[in-house]
Image (cartoon, rainbow, N blue to C red):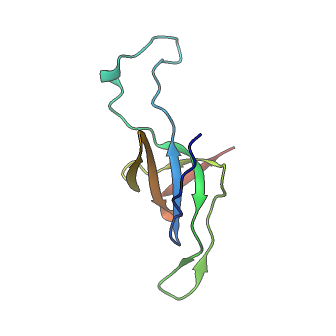
Amino acid sequence: MTKINLVPTPGYLLIEPAEAAMKTDSGIYLPDSASSEKPQKGKVLAVGGEEVLDSGKTRKSPVKVGDVVIYKKWGGSEVKVGTKEYLFAKFDDILAVEK
């Protein structure tokens, strides 16, 4: 695993998106052209500091490093480091934590 020197700003998470499925549950292999949908699931690599809300209160991250999360389809900002893509997502972009 490559060391990443990216630290999210307050209110953001750094997520490593899961690889797109190349095989269906029934065992059928999919061609590259079939996987146009990007995954909405990934592993949290880093957590920014507490988010400061408009009211002046702060909000802690809903997740921790290592959690696998489901995030909004159009949420976050992608960034490419070398050949790997990562996602910076707001705390609000997290829909669920996989248990």
Q: Is residue 33 above or below residue 77?
A: above
Instruction: Using the image as rendered, state which of residue 74 and residue 88 is in the foreground.
Output: 88
Residue 5 appears at what percent x and percent y?
Answer: 53, 57
Instruction: Using the image as rendered, state which of residue 5 and residue 19 is in the foreground.
Output: 5
Residue 47 appears at what percent x and percent y?
Answer: 59, 62
**Residue 21 at least partly seen:** yes
Quadrant showing the C terminus? top right
**Residue 75 at least partly seen:** no
Picture residue at 52% right of the left edge, 51% below the top? 15
Quadrant showing the N terminus? top right
Q: In this view, does 17 lie above or below 47?
A: above
Residue 38 appears at what percent x and percent y?
Answer: 39, 38
In the image, taking residue 61 as reference, residue 81 lies left or right, namely left
Picture residue at 65% right of the left edge, 49% below the top? 67
Looking at the image, the residue that sits furthest to the right is: 99
Picture residue at 58% right of the left edge, 48% below the top? 3
Looking at the image, the residue that sits furthest to the bottom is: 56
Picture residue at 59% right of the left edge, 58% below the top? 46
Q: Is residue 54 above or below residue 50?
A: below
